[in-house]
Image: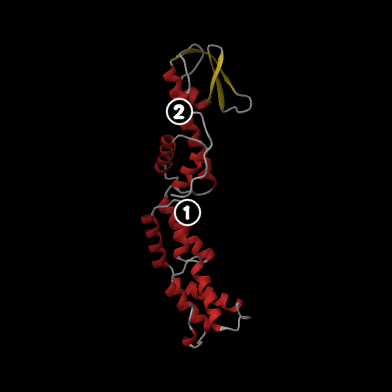
């Protein structure tokens, strides 16, 4: 799981001191027409999404126990969490853990967060396997990253090991990693043309490829190809 930043506190309905009462007013909020203010016994009690007000049949004269009020507030938290998560995935694709941690940072309870993630997965809006396949393909073709770098980046996004393994296996089968490494090695080799020491030039090119996620053997072969027939006895990255 990726690193979790400090969370913002939200009031927990379970901790609120609520009392039985009668709804005396339900008014649409001026600043946010999609929310309504609920007054109980002439006092402002809480805000709810208008959709929830309609779904629950909330209106003047309805009596609500403390437990019923608490249930409404939990439903509001769930509604808000789902709305936040939907806005996030509509902006760009996200992993389940990215959604999870975003909601936790906003202070939503863990049970609500997990329900929200499961809801999005059920709708097909969050799919770590599809995300991983697209991610490795785009980063390999667009940025030339190798498997190790791709694995590291996906782990930071909270994608599971098995899902990453499967995505990288598909990439390895579909793409020529050696050809990509050789192309990058050739470019780096040319950029290091001012380096007269061939061993240092090889070492720097090798380190560059490894940082970009290529394995030692693939990187070594690519550097050898870039050196274009240099004496193999000069090879020494130690």
Q: Which residue is tagged 1?
A: 156
Q: Please tell me in which quadrant of the rendered image residue 176 appears.
A: bottom left
Label 2–label 1 contact, CB within 8 A:
no
| Residue 80 picture location, percent across and down | 50, 33
Q: Is residue 79 above or below residue 159?
A: above
Foreground of the two, 200 or 213: 200
Foreground of the two, 114 or 85: 114
The local secondary structure at tag 1 comes to helix
Tag of residue 109: none
Q: Which residue is tagged 2?
A: 75
Q: Reading the chain from its start, which is encountered first: label 2 or label 1?
A: 2
| Real-space Cα separation, disc 2 to disc 1, in angstroms | 31 Å
The local secondary structure at tag 2 comes to helix
| Residue 43 picture location, percent across and down | 56, 14
Please name the residue shown 53% across and 48% down the image.
92
Q: Nearer the viewer, mark 2 or mark 1?
A: 1
Q: Is residue 62 visible?
A: no
Please name the residue shown 41% across and 62% down the image.
168
Q: Residue furthest front?
A: 238
Q: How is the image coloured?
A: secondary structure
């Amino acid at each position: 799981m990726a690193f979790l930043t400090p969370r913002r506190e939200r009031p927990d309905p379970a901790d609120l001191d609520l009392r039985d009462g009668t709804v005396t007013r339900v008014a649409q909020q001026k600043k946010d027409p999609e929310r309504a203010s609920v007054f109980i016994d002439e006092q402002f009690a809480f805000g709810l999404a208008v959709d929830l007000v309609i779904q629950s049949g909330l209106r003047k004269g309805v009596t609500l126990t403390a437990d019923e009020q608490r249930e409404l507030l939990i439903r509001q938290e769930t509604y808000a969490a789902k709305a936040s998560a939907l806005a996030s995935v509509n902006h760009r694709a996200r992993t389940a853990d990215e959604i999870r941690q975003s909601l936790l940072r906003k202070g939503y309870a863990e049970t609500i967060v997990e329900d929200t993630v499961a809801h999005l997965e059920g709708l097909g809006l969050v799919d770590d396997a599809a995300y991983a396949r697209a991610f490795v393909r785009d980063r390999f073709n667009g940025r030339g990253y190798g498997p190790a770098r791709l694995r590291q980046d996906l782990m930071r996004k909270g994608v599971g090991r098995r899902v990453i393994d499967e995505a990288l296996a598909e990439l390895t089968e579909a793409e020529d990693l050696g050809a990509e490494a050789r192309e990058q090695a050739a470019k780096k080799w040319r950029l290091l043309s001012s380096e007269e020491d061939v061993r240092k030039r090889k070492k720097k090119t090798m380190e560059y490829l490894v940082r970009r996620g290529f394995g030692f053997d693939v990187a070594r072969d690519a550097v050898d190809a870039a050196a274009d027939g240099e004496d193999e006895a000069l090879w020494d990255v130690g």
